[in-house]
Amino acid sequence: QVPLVESGGGLVQAGGSLRLSCAASGRTFTSYAMGWFRQAPGKEREFVAGISLIGVSTYYADSAKGRFTISRDSAKNMLYLQMNNLKPEDTAVYSCAARKNFLTSMRAHEYDYWGQGTQVTVSS
């Protein structure tokens, strides 16, 4: 298993920034592609960003392109999501997920492990 724990969420004004972190336990972090998803109240969970197993390839939802950056530090078993120019519509619970595959995916059901999530609230 790959227990995942997110941190870094909080309340921020529109236009501000946050960096989310996801700590992965276990020795197999480098065997997993990773992704960030979010779910707002009353909405379905949606893909935000993904990164391949060795971090060479990254993918972003259209809503995240140009504002968010996903990265991973395999030496520290850490995944990050730098979020800039935040908007009220970015308000959601953000979760990291691990997929035992070289490539990431936009489909939530293709991920094997999930964190509990961290709340991000952007005020206008």
Image (cartoon, rainbow, N blue to C red):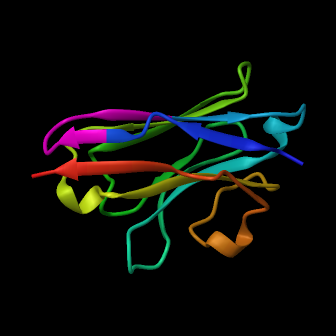
| Left or right side of 84 for 112 | right
The part of the chain drawn in magenta is: 11-20
- Expressed as whole percent of the image width and height from the top left, the position of residue 45 reads 50, 72
State the predominant SS element of the stretch in magenta. strand
In front of the other: 5 or 104: 5
- Expressed as whole percent of the image width and height from the top left, the position of residue 56 reads 61, 38
- Residue at (58, 40) in percent of width and height: 6
- Expressed as whole percent of the image width and height from the top left, the position of residue 100 reads 82, 55
Q: In the image, is residue 14 part of the stretch drawn in magenta? A: yes
- Residue at (36, 48) in percent of width and height: 120
- Expressed as whole percent of the image width and height from the top left, the position of residue 42 reads 38, 80
Q: Which of the 4 quarters of the picture holds residue 53? A: top right
Q: Which of the 4 quarters of the picture holds residue 2? A: top right
Rendered position, 43 above or below 47: below
In front of the other: 47 or 4: 4
In front of the other: 29 or 96: 96
Q: Which of the 4 quarters of the picture holds residue 67? A: top left
In front of the other: 57 or 6: 6
- Residue at (35, 44) in percent of width and height: 68
* Residue occupying the far left of the picture: 124
